């Protein structure tokens, strides 16, 4: 399956600052990547679908101006949390669409906003 | 809208005993079903999938799952549990837009 990395693995920031999270597909060219967030002891919620070379598709209730997604190449998608607040603290996970209908997930990024 | 239900928040089993983690689904059309495992502070690892074909699907680490269309279930099983299997397990269903909908997860605890 595809190998997916995320950077950073964890980040702590002050309220009001912006944070960028990178998702890389290391051995697979991904036209589609997905961004999820996961609260403690809860399931994954899809935030948006990232499409290479075009605008991301956001799920209902996700603020596109707050969670900026850029998919500039077939191996890199970035999620920028703008003007972060404590309620944005969460575990953010990206995934890559594999060839066999399954998705392959990155290791996740723990964001803590103080 | 599609949905997945995992009725058990936690499953406890002794090492060496068989384990079952339950999953039922609701979807229009043919289901694409998946099981993933998550270890603490990690992303999800793919275990197995059902797309079509045999109802019994074999996956990684000795896990298997049985697709039952009449009961709309896709239970995860393993004949002999290991302590290292202790983790959070998610069932998921995929729609035509390739969007995954996850269940709420089941914490598996395997004890000596």
Image (cartoon, coloured by chain):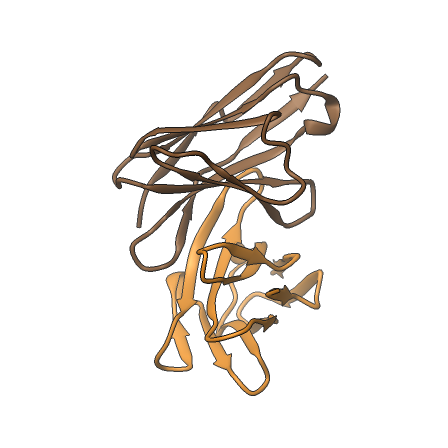
Q: Identify the residue at image location x=51%, y=61%.
A: B82
**Image side of residue A8 versus residue A27, left or right:** right
Taking depth in this image into account, of B28 and B7 the one nearest to the observer is B28
Q: Which chain is brown?
A: A
Taking depth in this image into account, of B85 and A112 the one nearest to the observer is A112
Please tell me whether residue B57 is drawn above or below residue A110 in the rendered image.
below
Q: Which chain is orange?
A: B
**Image side of residue B38 versus residue A3, left or right:** right
Residue B92 location (% of width, % of height) = 53, 61
Given the current orientation, which residue lies at the most extreme front position? A54
Give the quadrant of the N terminus of chain B. Answer: bottom right
Residue A45 location (% of width, % of height) = 61, 46
Residue B48 location (% of width, % of height) = 41, 64
Q: Identify the residue at image location x=37%, y=38%.
A: A4
Residue A102 location (% of width, % of height) = 39, 57
**Image side of residue A48 versus residue A50, left or right:** right
């Amino acid at each position: 399956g595809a190998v997916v990395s995320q950077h950073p693995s964890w980040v702590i920031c002050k309220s009001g600052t912006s944070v960028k999270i990178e998702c890389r597909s290391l051995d697979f060219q991904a036209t589609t990547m997905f961004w999820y967030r996961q609260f403690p002891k809860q399931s994954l919620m899809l935030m948006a679908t990232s499409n290479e070379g075009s605008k991301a598709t956001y799920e209902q209730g996700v603020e596109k101006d707050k969670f900026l997604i850029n998919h500039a190449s077939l191996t890199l998608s970035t999620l920028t949390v703008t003007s972060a607040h404590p309620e944005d603290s969460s575990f953010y996970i990206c995934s890559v669409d594999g060839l066999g209908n399954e998705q392959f997930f990155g290791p996740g990024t723990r964001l803590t906003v103080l | 809208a599609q949905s997945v239900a995992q009725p058990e928040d936690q499953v406890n089993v002794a090492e060496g005993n068989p384990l079952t983690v339950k999953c039922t689904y609701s979807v229009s059309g043919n289901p694409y079903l998946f099981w993933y495992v998550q270890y603490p502070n990690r992303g999800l690892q793919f275990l197995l999938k059902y797309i079509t074909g045999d109802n019994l699907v074999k996956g990684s680490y000795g896990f298997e799952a049985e697709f039952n269309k009449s009961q709309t279930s896709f239970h995860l099983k393993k004949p002999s549990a290991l302590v290292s299997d202790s983790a959070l397990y998610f069932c998921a269903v995929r729609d035509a837009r390739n969007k995954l909908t996850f269940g709420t997860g089941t914490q598996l605890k395997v004890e000596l």
